[in-house]
Amino acid sequence: MRYKAYSLKDLESIPQLKHLGKEIIDDIYTVAEIYPFKTNNYVIEQLIDWKKGIDDPIFRLNFPHRDMLLDEHYDKLIWGKKNGNAEALKHIIREIRLSLNPHPAGQTLYNIPRDADGEAIEGLQHKYRTTVLYFPSHAQTCHAYCTFCFRWPQFVKDLDLKIQAKEIEPLIYYLENNPGVSEVLITGGDPMVMTPRIFEAYIDAILKVDTIRAIRIGTKSLSYWPYKFVTDPERDDMLNVLKKVVDSGRHLAIMAHFNHPAELDPPVVREAILNLKKIGAEIRTQAPLLRNINNKASIWTAMWEKQMQLGCIPYYMFLPRDTGAQHYFAESLFTAFDIYREAIKCTPGLCRTVRGPVMSMTTGKVEILDYEQGVFTLRYIQNRNPEFTYKVFQAISLVKQPHWFDDLACFDPKYSDFFEDGISRKKRIISA
Ligand code: SF4
């Protein structure tokens, strides 16, 4: 199979779509004014079960849906498309995008490394002591786009919404001057869209830094384009570049993104996983819990069991971040915890490496441990301040159906430090 991407301009050439009706197609065009859209021939031909129509989970994962926009945004867009001139429509689109919290977790405000002159280094994030996130400009696209993606601003044309590094030197400078950093997470987009030659330049430079012990690659290629590691003409070259990491004595972690067990069904996925494991990669899997796609415990149990069977390590169940179409995808924190617990209860021990449900935020990653009578017990798995890591704290909900940490409040002064991140959109500290 040869990779073929489909963007909005090719929509009409996808024959399977024609059976869904004009209204659905019109909505795809409208919603894709705000969120990026891209699919490919593998997703269309082998992942989506078109018999299920728009309820197919992979269809929902990949194709925009009218309800992914709030009514007020949808109406404004329709009005703009019908009545406004091109400039006016552009303005409406930008206004809506900016109102969707394009940079959750304070990505453009916090955790930005500085160079020797105190200037921000573009395309880098340093939140946790040992790990730096690197966003190479060559990786700022994916084999297909997910409708829930919290990195959606990376793929729209407003360049000032994008986080990306155009050069490798600032990263190397930063790593050499911060020996406490032992891991680089190369992310995007998807670094596995790069050609082996370009990817190799990044890997070679990072491997020259002695203090680096692990390289992580954040990718959804095993789901959206597994042929990358099986039949693509540059397969061997790419596997050889990845093998360099292992041969250098470092840990190579493929942070694989799967949202539904259907993504693991095609035999080519198993082949791709085996080829990666042959060169010594560890594959850890992660995904958010999403309404309309994977919000059933049985789906997660099946997914973790399949992953374990294929030799992957289930790692995280995340919650959808407070950006984009969170209103469409997020379950309440109560439901999310119930789904996680029900799912994990039914898995064998080898799957219980997975942690969840987890919110990844400005301050760190918070795991829900339990809830009872409206009181949540939580724990930071990671925090910018290591003092808070692995300490348990409690919170109550400010609303009937909390969907994010911002909906929770501190009710006991002894926990107040856990709530102060300085950029909360809601007041979260209430008196005891
Ligand atoms: S593959 Fe990853 S980065 Fe790309 S759209 Fe999907 S979630 Fe976002």
Image (cartoon, rainbow, N blue to C red):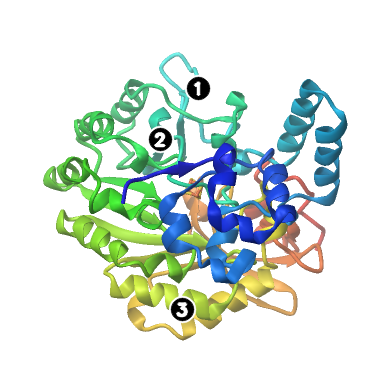
The C terminus is located in which quarter?
A: bottom right
User: Which residue shows up at 54% across the image and 35% down it?
Assistant: 154
User: Which residue shows up at 59% across the image and 55% down it?
Assistant: 17
Mark 1: which amino acid? Ala
Residue at the spot of label 1: 120
Label 3 and label 2: CA atoms lie apart by 31 Å
Specify few, some or many for label 2: CA neighbours under 10 Å numbering under 14, 14-19, or 20 or more.
many
How far from the left and from the top, in percent, is residue 28?
67, 48
The number of numbered badges drawn on the structure is: 3
Residue at the spot of label 2: 139
Q: Would you say residue 258 is visible in this rendering?
A: no
Mark 2: which amino acid? Ala
- Of residue 403 and residue 289, the one placed in the foreground of this image is 289
- Of residue 117 and residue 333, the one placed in the foreground of this image is 333
The answer to whether 352 is drawn above or below residue 195 in the figure is: below
The answer to whether 204 is drawn above or below residue 387 in the figure is: above
How far from the left and from the top, in percent, is residue 20?
65, 60
Residue at the spot of label 3: 301
How far from the left and from the top, in percent, is residue 245?
19, 43
Q: Is residue 161 left or right of residue 268?
A: right
Residue 166 falls in image quadrant? top left
For marks 3 and 2, the one nearer the N-term is 2
Mark 3: which amino acid? Thr
For marks 1 and 3, the one nearer the N-term is 1
Residue 272 falls in image quadrant? bottom left
How far from the left and from the top, in percent, is residue 398?
80, 62
Specify whether tag 2 is near ligand 1 (CB below 8 Å): no
Q: Is residue 176 left or right of residue 65?
A: left
| Circles 2 and 1 in contact, beta carbons < 8 Å | no
The answer to whether 2 is drawn above or below residue 155 in the figure is: below
Label 2 and label 1: CA atoms lie apart by 20 Å
- Of residue 251 and residue 381, the one placed in the foreground of this image is 251
